[in-house]
Image (cartoon, rainbow, N blue to C red):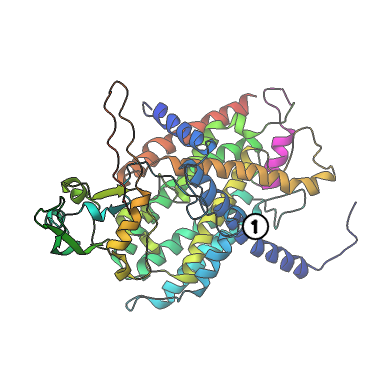
Amino acid sequence: MPKVPGLVKGLGVTFRTMLRPAVTVQYPHEKEAPPTRARGVIALLEENCTVCMLCARSCPDWCIYIEGHKEKAPPRREGGKPRTVAKLDRFDIDYALCMYCGICVDVCPFDAMFWTPEYEYSEPRIADLLHDKERLAEWMETVPENEAYEGGSDQKPKKIPRPTV
Amino acid sequence: MTLALELAYWQQTTIKALIVLVMVPTATAIIVQTFLFKVMAHMQSRLGPMEAGPHGSMQLLADGAKFLQKEIVAPARADKFVFGMAPVVVLISTFLVWVIIPAGPNAIVADFGVGIFFALAVSSLSTIGVLMAGWASANKYALIGGLRAAGQLIAYELPLVLAVVGVVIQAGTMSMQGIITAQHEGEIFGVGLIGNPYALTQFVGLAIFLVAVQAELTQTPFDMPVAESELVAGYQVEYSGLQFLFFYIGEFGTAFAFSAIAATMFLGGWTLPFVELDSGWMHLLGPVVLFAKTMFIAFLIFWFRFTYPRFREDQLQTFAWKYLIPISLVNILATAVLKVVF
């Protein structure tokens, strides 16, 4: 008998839930807006990448493939020595392996990788989940600007670098 | 006002049998669609099926078509004949319960003098079907499930019958139409304004009846026989396709039938207060009134189902033998005493 109030309360909970509108989002017909910092897919800003391989080495799944070479570039000032710059030949992320831990984004010292909340990139063939550097660069335009800090802080949120070309 | 149509006995019987044959799957469909798909979904803050037809209302056609396509598989070591007969036995028990449910002054297949007793007797036939299924499947989960089901159905048959006895004492008859008439013309301590729906005077009996029905139908708090997380699906584990569908129709067809019986015995069945029993309107209105009351009782059953978690096996037996049966015996005693006094 001491359990009866709890039993009645339980009935009340289910009854009230029934009268409230359901939380379901009818996905293909209507889309859910994910939070700004949701981990949907990783975008690559190629011009910031120095082929340092930190992301590829820190990836727990080994799903980032990087190849690059050194190139001579014209000197910055007249009469200077030609510079050596790293050029990216290949930058692939295999989303069939990726577990969305975000360590690569955290570890990148040059701000070349960003999270974007896009999530609609499923493929009928598993091999197509390997995004090459052109595909990863396309995601750049979906990267949202950082949200303002919470009240009381006069720090400005960091601006997201955008491709210059 | 009578129809100028005289039918031979065999013609009447055929028509009645056909109506029951159509009504049972229809009622099952209504119960499953309304409660299992939609009410359950909304109680869990979901929408349920939405794609097939407007608001998923055609979902059962899709499901039924799917079941019909499936191959009927029997395990190699199963007792093939018993295995095949088990769903049929369960289904027959469901069909027989429907025989005594009155939906209007004349809309009843057979108004037996022992009506409610007949319903409870044939409904316990399904225990045999469940035991047959559990034994013939040659599967340990099915066997455990079948034994649990037998233990549970026998334990809760008693409070079910004892709860009905109170009503029978008060009405002085076991015939379903008799019980309805007694409620419509009855008086509560001399006040006969709305008749005497036994939900008011036999509320203890109604509560016990609802709990026992919940257990008889193996709906959740009492679903140990089909507990999917421990027994996979109990006695249903080896059944596929049409045979599984038979068990399904048996379960929810009986749910509708028991809701209708509860509506008849405790809520006055197809009658409405203030409307004369022999009014011609009741021939038309009766089935609608009965349907509304039945859906109300069915809502209660499924509301409990969607709210409570499963009992443990020993808690289930304790609940029946130590609480429900003594309470219903006291209820019978009190009813009998009051019947003699007033």
Instruction: Identify which residue is drawn at 18% across, 47% down.
Output: A110
The residue wearing badge 1 is B99
Q: Position of residue A41 (x, y in %)?
A: 31, 53
Q: Residue furthest front?
A: A79
Q: Nearer the viewer, residue B277 or B335?
A: B277
Residue range highlighted in magenta: B175-192
Q: Residue at x 15, y 46 (%)?
A: A109
Q: Is residue A27 magenta?
A: no
A141 on left or right of B250? left
Category of crowding for the residue at label 1, using alpha-carbon neighbours closer than 10 angstroms: few (below 14), some (14–19), many (at least 20) = many
Q: Give left or right: position of B31 versus A160.
A: right
Q: Quadrant of residue B75?
A: bottom left
Residue B162 appears in view: no
**Up/down of B89 relative to B306, above or below:** below
Q: Is residue B88 left or right of residue A159?
A: right
Figure label count: 1
**Label 1: chain?**
B
B177 drawn magenta: yes
Considering only vertical position in the picture, is A85 above or below B300? below
| Place of residue B163 in the rendered image (x, y in percent of width and height, measured from the top left) | 52, 39
Q: Left or right: where does residue B144 sit relative to residue B256?
A: left
Q: Nearer the viewer, residue A40 or B43?
A: A40
Q: Nearer the viewer, residue A80 or A9?
A: A80
Q: Amino acid at mark 1?
A: Val
Horizontal and vertical percent position of residue A120? 40, 57
At numbered mark 1, what does the secondary structure look like: helix, strand or loop?
helix
Q: Where is B186 relative to B307, above or below?
A: above
Tell me residue A75's x, y (percent).
Answer: 14, 54
Report if residue B9 is visible in the image. Answer: yes
The quadrant of the picture occupied by the C terminus of chain A is bottom left
Report the residue that reaches farthest toward the left: A81
Residue located 47% across and 74% down the image: B70
